[in-house]
């Protein structure tokens, strides 16, 4: 295998230049999906792509595609990508690294004088984070056909602005077709966890994504005066939720080390300092590498929560908000990454993605895989998110060689 190398300094400079768009006071980024900051970041990327000889198209949900022609331009493209939108107080690399690695691959192929047989594209998927609009990853979901276009366009943010209105305001809608054929999809990403760093490894060969189940829970008790209602006569929804949280922690201990559970949001309706909580809603996030285990975890949540509610005289409602099955990645694409890692002589390990990514949805559309690099302290969705420039270079080198091999098929 003829080993290619990217320009690590150029890649890092691109990352730092993008980080100036929507910069936060603690070194992170705020580019909420389809905001003016997101538009500015996209326009910066578009300018770089046009300088690299790429053409630009959009689809009706605002997904952005930069295309480099191939010698046989009628073949389906090999696609790289990720997202440029961030959390409200997000980092400089989550998503952005994958997009700009794709750009560096194109630039490095030009530097080396390598002509790609197949066309190459870089995708910037709309609203991967789900921080402004829900659900998350709806750009790739609409593209792959797992979410209706109108459903996504009609979603509104907390200010009542719809996706349709936001797209019109930044002018990034288009008519590129959904579900068009891709030869393969490769996504480079920071791990967003501590495993690679803890193991002292610069590269993770991602073999798939774990199952994710989101639940919305409502616990209904009775509001009453905090000073006049005896403890034995209370129907305190929050104390019920506290016991349910303890049950979650006990439950997940049965599914270690792969089982994960998180309560990310809790809301007390009409809360007041001296009023017993009458109604509490909260979210539950369940994750596991195996579908049958996530199903068992979900059933146990229902059983354990109901027992708590019955014992305390509380009403309980649990609704499944979202389910993403465990997703194995394509064996040929995974092996292409593995061959690139071996050719570059990088230490590495196989790893399953713990986070949701656009690649999880693309895997149901075309052969797909991912490349992970470490992030310092396993920290992500945080302004302090950081990566080592040498790890950034190594991950891009792996992507470059895996994609180049695929484009020559």
Image (tube, rainbow, N blue to C red):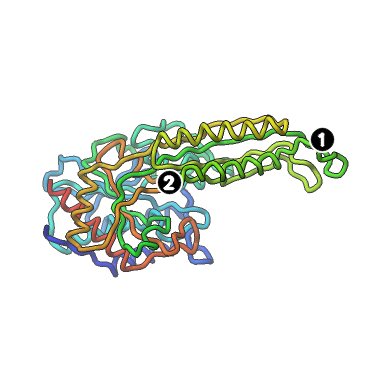
Q: Position of residue 312 (x, y in %)?
A: 72, 34
The residue indicated by pointer 1 is 233
Mark 2 is surrounded, within 10 Å at the Cα level, by few (under 14), some (14 to 19) or many (20 or more) other residues, namely: some
Query: Which residue corresponds to the image point at 49% horizontal and 66% vertical from the top-left?
Result: 27
The residue depicted at 57 percent of the width and 42 percent of the height is: 248
Element on which disc 1 rests: helix
* Quarter of the figure with residue 409: top left
Residue drawn at point x = 11 percent, y = 48 percent: 71
Q: Quadrant of the N terminus?
A: bottom left
Neighbours of disc 1 within 10 Å: few (<14), some (14-19), many (20+): few
Q: Position of residue 344 (x, y in %)?
A: 19, 62
Q: Which residue is mark 2?
A: 258
- Mark toward the start of the polypeptide (2 vs 1): 1
Question: How far separated are the C-alphas under marks 2 and 1?
Answer: 41 Å
Residue sitting nearer the eye, 98 or 323: 323
Count the numbered circles shown.
2
In which image quadrant can residue 53 be found? bottom left
Residue 87, x across and y down, in percent: 49, 53
Can residue 396 be spotted in the picture? yes
């Amino acid at each position: 295998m003829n080993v290619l190398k990217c320009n690590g300094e150029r890649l890092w400079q691109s990352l730092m230049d993008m980080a100036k768009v929507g910069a936060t006071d603690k070194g992170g980024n705020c580019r909420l999906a389809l905001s003016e900051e997101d538009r500015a970041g996209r326009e910066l990327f578009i300018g770089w792509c046009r300088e690299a000889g790429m053409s630009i198209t959009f689809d009706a949900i605002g997904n952005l595609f930069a295309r480099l022609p191939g010698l046989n331009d009628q073949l389906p493209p090999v696609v790289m990508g990720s997202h440029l939108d961030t959390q409200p107080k997000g980092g400089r690399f989550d998503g952005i690294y994958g997009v700009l690695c794709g750009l560096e691959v194109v630039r490095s192929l030009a530097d080396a004088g390598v002509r790609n047989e197949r066309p190459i594209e870089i995708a910037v998927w709309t609203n991967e984070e789900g921080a402004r609009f829900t659900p998350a990853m709806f750009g790739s979901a609409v593209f792959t056909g797992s979410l209706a276009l109108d459903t996504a366009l009609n979603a509104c943010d907390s200010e009542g602005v719809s996706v349709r209105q936001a797209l019109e305001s930044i002018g990034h809608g288009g008519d590129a077709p959904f579900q068009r054929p891709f030869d393969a999809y490769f996504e480079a990403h920071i791990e967003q966890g501590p495993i690679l760093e803890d193991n002292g490894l610069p590269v993770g060969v991602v073999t798939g994504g774990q199952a994710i189940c989101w639940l919305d829970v409502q616990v209904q008790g009775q509001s009453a005066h905090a000073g006049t209602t005896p403890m034995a006569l209370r129907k305190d929804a929050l104390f019920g939720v506290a016991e349910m949280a303890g049950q979650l922690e006990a439950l997940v201990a049965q599914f270690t080390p792969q089982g994960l559970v998180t309560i990310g949001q809790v809301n007390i309706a009409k809360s007041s300092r001296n009023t017993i909580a009458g109604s509490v809603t909260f979210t539950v996030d369940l994750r596991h590498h195996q579908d049958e285990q996530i199903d068992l975890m979900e059933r146990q949540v229902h059983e354990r929560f109901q027992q708590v509610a019955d014992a305390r005289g509380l009403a309980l409602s649990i609704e499944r908000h979202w389910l993403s099955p465990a997703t194995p990645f394509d064996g040929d694409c995974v092996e292409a990454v593995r061959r690139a890692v071996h050719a570059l002589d990088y230490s590495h390990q196989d790893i399953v993605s713990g986070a949701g990514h656009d690649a999880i949805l693309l895997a149901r559309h075309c052969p797909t895989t991912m490349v992970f690099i470490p992030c310092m302290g396993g920290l992500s969705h945080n302004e302090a998110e950081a990566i080592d420039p040498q790890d950034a270079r190594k991950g891009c080198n792996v992507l470059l060689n895996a994609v180049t091999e695929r484009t020559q098929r």
